[in-house]
Amino acid sequence: MNKNIKITFWILFAMFAALIIHLCYFTVIEAPTAVNNPYNLRLASKESSIKRGNIEDINGVVIAESVLEEESYTRQYNYPRMYCHITGYTDMGKTGAESAYNAELLTLHNETLQKFLYIMTNKVFKNGNFSLTGFDGFDCVIEEAYAMDGFSPDFDGDTGGFDGFGENNGNGFDYTASGSGAEAETEDISEEASEEITEETSEETTETVFEDDSEIGSEIKDIYENIESSPTPDLDTIYSDGYESENDFFAPLKDGFVLEGNTVVLSVDHRIQEKAYELLGERKGSIVVSDVNTGMIKAMVSYPNYDPGSIADNWEYLTTDEENTPLLNRASQGLYTPGSIFKIGMAQLLIDTGQEDMTFECSGINHFGNKTLRCYNETVHGHINLRDAFKQSCNGFFAQAALNLMADRLITQAKNLGYNSDYDFPLEHSISVFKLTEEADNSELTDTGIGQGKTMVTPLHINMITAAAANGGIMYTPQITAAVKSYNGSIIKEYEPEEMGRVMSEETSVKLRELMRAVVSEGTGTLADSSQIAIAGKTGTAENGTDNDHIWFTCFAPYENPEYAVTVMLEYTGTSSKATPIAKELLEYINTLE
């Protein structure tokens, strides 16, 4: 009997422990995902009562906002096609930043303050009655603002203080200099607001002296200072507008007042985004610009694009156009054969394994057993070393390098650079694919070594690798958001750079940068060479089963002190001469910005 009881006890204990562990996991790990899930009914219920926050660029340019039309708010995109793959849309579900930061855009900051300021600016001081001093109705204003948050404040007009929850609840707010009992229990709140408000009273007026650096206190202070000497209205004056009682006075607030959600500040610089959008034009492809030292995305454009403001009207076309796939963010979701930009990783591996002195005899058409590989235009490179092979993008050299390194090292290198691994990027994105196995034959190895075969990458991932080569070997998590602000501009949260890890040594990084500089100064990327800013990069031509190859150019600048990484990917273009000038012009423009 005792044995059965013990068994039952431990079974129940294990079940409760599993439940607690699951709840902790959900709260810590899964909660953010659940909160932002578009099927979250709690967020959906907020849509009708909260004005959705803005989406802005790093300099305050408003990208998306909610505009009042008749009796409801409509989402307006001020640069619809330029930002569509970043902002996403809110009709027909949610995508992009609208989805990733849905909770932030519908979250209120200082809800009571918003209500208080609305009352004071739209009702109390209506029709030129600008006065708070001695106003008999000030207590009902404060009480109503807090009552809308579930509080029941008692304002004392004689002493100049009020308790947030009333006498019967031993807690409360106190706007006097000090307090005891219910007032003393709010010291933590007062300290958090850094607030000290003293009240001095006389027979005819109540003068408030604010000593406050907090957000709430400073805003109320500004209102008070503007109205202190104005004529004093009473409730009869206020109700002369048609309000017969205090309940009528606050009725329009309850019916028409709209609370504002937080603003999401993108890391994107609108000036760079606009230039990248202009340069990409109507070419199928994408451009990604990032800060090499933080991972912050400064621009991300993709074409074909769409208008997120008319998504519902064009839904059938947008979801059935398989040739153009306008809803696809080619920068983060598009998977492409890397072609010769894969040679950045190959060169790193040769350096790291002590094989950077390797040489090869290139005949333009090179044979590897039953496998034949041609260099671009069947160019004969002759006896060639790593530096010359990299700047001339010799296929024969890197095919032989793959055979020398063998599959296991290539697999390890791919894992090191983030292939087959997800990363914490808030927008929809694909995972780069590396399918080589240790049983791979020579044909698979040589194809892989030149960036062909089954390897697939996204432009965003290539940009991350480029940035790591530029900054000394650290790969950063790409970030599209810089901060979250409240409705009045105060910073609630700032996003800090996040390191994914070191993917190469500083010594290897220096050597890679030298190789990439040679590509631009004297190799296949000379069309990106600029007299205004030193650029280093790598060209790439990727076969795709058609007569028109995909074209890559990924680079960074300035060479001596890297700041920006730019990756240009053009579909079915055929020659790198169309991608390199885009990167050059974009970096020259960035170089002029302050």
Image (cartoon, rainbow, N blue to C red):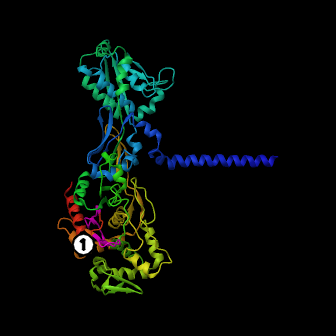
Nearest to the observer: residue 166 or residue 386? 386
The amino acid beneath tag 1 is: Gly
- The quarter of the image holding the C terminus is bottom left
Locate residue 333: give its quadrant.
bottom left
Q: Is 561 a magenta residue?
A: yes
Residue 362 at x, y percent in the picture: 32, 86
Mark 1: secondary structure: loop
Whether residue 534 is visible to the viewer of this picture, yes or no, is no
Q: Quadrant of residue 507?
A: bottom left
Magenta residues span 537-566
The quadrant in which residue 303 appears is bottom left
Residue at position x 39%, y 30% in the image:
112
Give the residue at the far left of this rendering.
Answer: 531
Q: Nearer the viewer, residue 169 or 361?
A: 361
Q: Is residue 517 visible to the viewer in this orientation of the structure?
A: yes
Note whether 334 is above or below 83 in the view shown.
below
Residue 293: % across, % down: 33, 60
Name the outermost residue toward the right: 1
Residue at mark 1? 525
Residue 222 percent across, percent down from the top left: 28, 29
Q: Is 98 displayed left or right of 23 in the figure?
A: left
Q: How many C-alpha atoms fall within 10 Å of the one at disc 1: few (<14), some, or many (≥20)?
A: many
